[in-house]
């Protein structure tokens, strides 16, 4: 079975309380898997106006000194948020989303952990423009966490929900979900939304589903299969996650063929925006045109 490691984790930050939960979440990987954490500040200038004291013109004329001071602020922030944890710090000058994607590529990050803006009600969730742009620009898995969605001061992962269909990217996401469940000794709930399948064929689909899921789940992982057949897929997944009190949702997103862009489908986008727990979005870049989705009808009639 393919092994997924999370040795190198990138955590973009604006050095505010907004990003502190993302850093604490990354610390869980450090504690469990000895992951290396890199804290990144990225902007089109080297300075956040609310962090440094002098007028902007001063910093433009003294860029080297400004960067050094910002690096010091970043180090102080890391030490305050994660005392005793070895955190690397780096600064990137450029549009934040592109700088984050490029930094992740250069350091060969296994995971990006980002904070998102707090929600304003179920229908007015704000993912954050930078976070959403990063999801489209990188094929590195992105874990998004939202302040206020986790009750514990120290994050925990006890139950993981992974919605799947019979596609390659769903299997990729399931591999990651299984690796997460093993790392945190969590229960894995695999969800299949069977909304378009006629009732008499459900047993056949469930059997095919079980065969498809089994090889992707690690032997030491506790998991259960859940099939839901009513409602819009994203709402079904979100409802299931709420019912099982999920601490994490793992989703797949297809990387556009011959492109650096990632295609975030409507279901994935809705789940990422409205989830009441952190979401890990896994993108898979297609390598050949032969890697096609397997139609459910073929599995039903096989």
Image (tube, rainbow, N blue to C red):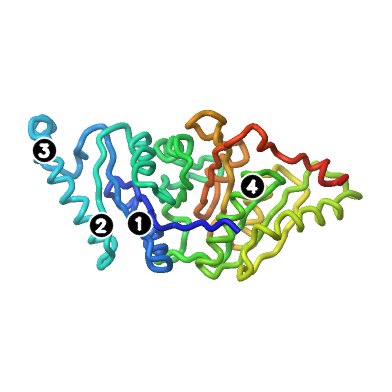
Tell me the quarter of the picture where residue 161 sits.
bottom right
Give me the C-alpha separation between circle 2 and circle 4: 35 Å
Disc 2 crowd rating (10 Å Cα; few below 14, some 14-19, many 20+) is many
Counting residues from the start of the chain, the first of labels 3 and 2 encountered is: 3
**SS at badge 3:** helix
Dot 4 or dot 3: first in sequence order is 3
The image shows residue 92 at horizontal and vertical percentages of 26, 39
- Structural distance between the alpha carbons of marks 3 and 2: 21 Å
Q: Position of residue 150 (x, y in %)?
A: 47, 60
Tag of residue 64:
3
- Tell me, for residue 122, which label it has, or none: none
Judged left or right of residue 32, residue 123 is right
Mark before the other along the chain sequence, 1 or 3: 1
CB contact under 8 Å: marks 1 and 2: yes
Look at mark 1 in the image and give the residue it sits on.
23
Label 4's element?
A: helix
Counting from the top left corner in percent of width and height, residue 139 is at 48, 41
Residue 19 percent coordinates (x, y): 34, 51
Q: Which residue is mark 4?
A: 170
- Image: 171 above or below 210: above
Q: Nearer the viewer, mark 3 or mark 2?
A: 3
The residue singled out by tag 2 in the image is 78
Asked whether, in this view, residue 167 is left or right of residue 20, the answer is: right
């Amino acid at each position: 079975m393919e092994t997924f490691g999370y040795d190198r984790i990138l955590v973009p930050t604006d050095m505010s309380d907004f990003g502190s939960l993302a850093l604490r979440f990354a610390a869980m990987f450090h504690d469990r898997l000895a992951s290396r954490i890199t804290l990144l500040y990225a902007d089109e200038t080297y300075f956040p106006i609310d962090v440094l004291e002098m007028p902007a013109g001063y910093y433009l004329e003294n860029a080297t000194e400004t960067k050094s001071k910002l690096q010091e602020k970043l180090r102080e922030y890391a030490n305050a948020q994660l005392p005793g944890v070895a955190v690397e710090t780096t600064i990137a000058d450029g549009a934040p989303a592109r700088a984050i994607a490029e930094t992740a590529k250069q350091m060969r990050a296994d995971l990006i952990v980002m904070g998102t803006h707090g929600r304003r009600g179920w229908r007015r969730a704000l993912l954050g423009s930078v976070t959403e742009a990063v999801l489209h620009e990188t094929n590195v898995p992105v874990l998004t966490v939202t302040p206020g969605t986790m009750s514990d001061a120290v994050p925990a992962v006890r139950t993981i929900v992974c919605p799947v269909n019979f596609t390659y990217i769903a299997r990729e996401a399931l591999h990651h979900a299984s690796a997460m469940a093993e790392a945190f000794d969590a229960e894995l709930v695999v969800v299949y939304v069977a909304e378009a399948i006629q009732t008499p064929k459900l047993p056949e689909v469930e059997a095919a589903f079980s065969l498809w899921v089994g090889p992707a789940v690690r032997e030491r992982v506790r998991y259960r299969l859940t099939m839901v057949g009513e409602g819009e897929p994203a709402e079904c997944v979100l409802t299931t996650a709420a019912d099982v009190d999920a601490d994490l949702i793992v989703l797949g997103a297809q990387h556009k063929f011959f492109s650096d862009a990632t295609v975030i489908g409507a279901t994935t986008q809705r789940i990422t925006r409205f989830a009441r727990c952190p979401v890990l979005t896994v993108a898979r870049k297609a390598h050949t045109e032969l890697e096609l989705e397997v139609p459910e009808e073929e599995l039903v009639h096989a």
